Image: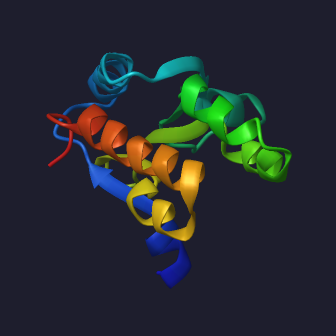
Amino acid sequence: MNMMKMMMFRTYTSKLGFDETVERLHAQALENGWTIPYTYDLQEAYIAAGHEDMTKVTILYFCNSGGGYEILKDDSNKMMSVLMPTGVTVYEDSRGAVKIAAMNFGLMHNFFLGTNKRVFKDAAARMARSLDSIVE
């Protein structure tokens, strides 16, 4: 696997079935201060486009409007909006295992200073709490 991909993203194995993982992740994200402005059923979209063999993939978009605002109020940080809200994906692999993939905020905060560092470090803690009791 590509080293950069391994560093930038974290993949976890869920202890739950697909639908229960999506539901529990959504609930725990809300409990940990995230909002979920949008959930996208990627499998449904791909099947509608003619890709019948697509496995289950759902993206929950996690948003921390307070942290995002702190970052984006500085014009030099506006480009970081491409990460906002951040997609957290629940997917079923070809063997039927349920996985969760997310940005590795624990690593990412090390690349920044000041407000960005603080917000990304907070995101890492919120993400960890949101995954608690779901992943192995």
Seen from the viewer's position, the closer of residues 41 and 32 is 32
Q: Viewed as shown, does residue 81 lie left or right of 134?
A: right
Q: Quadrant of residue 67?
A: top right
Q: Quadrant of residue 47?
A: top right
Q: Is residue 59 above or below residue 105?
A: above
Seen from the viewer's position, the closer of residues 81 and 50 is 81
Residue 98 in the image: x percent, y percent? 31, 43
What residue is at 38 percent from the left and 48 percent from the top? 124
Q: Viewed as shown, does residue 112 lie left or right of 18?
A: right
What residue is at 75 percent from the left and 42 percent from the top? 81
**Can residue 63 be spotted in the picture?**
no
Numbered marks: total: 0
Seen from the viewer's position, the closer of residues 121 and 6 is 121
**Can residue 134 be spotted in the picture?**
yes
Seen from the viewer's position, the closer of residues 113 and 48 is 113
Residue 64 in the image: x percent, y percent? 53, 28
Q: Is residue 106 above or below residue 7?
A: above
What residue is at 52 percent from the left and 19 percent from the top? 36
Q: What sort of colour scheme is used for the picture?
A: rainbow
Residue 114 in the image: x percent, y percent? 56, 55
Q: Viewed as shown, does residue 95 lie left or right of 88?
A: left
Q: Is residue 29 above or below residue 3?
A: above
Q: Please identify the residue farthest to the front as the structure is shown.
A: 114
Q: Viewed as shown, does residue 125 lie left or right of 94?
A: left
Residue 79 in the image: x percent, y percent? 81, 50
Q: Is residue 74 above or below residue 116?
A: above
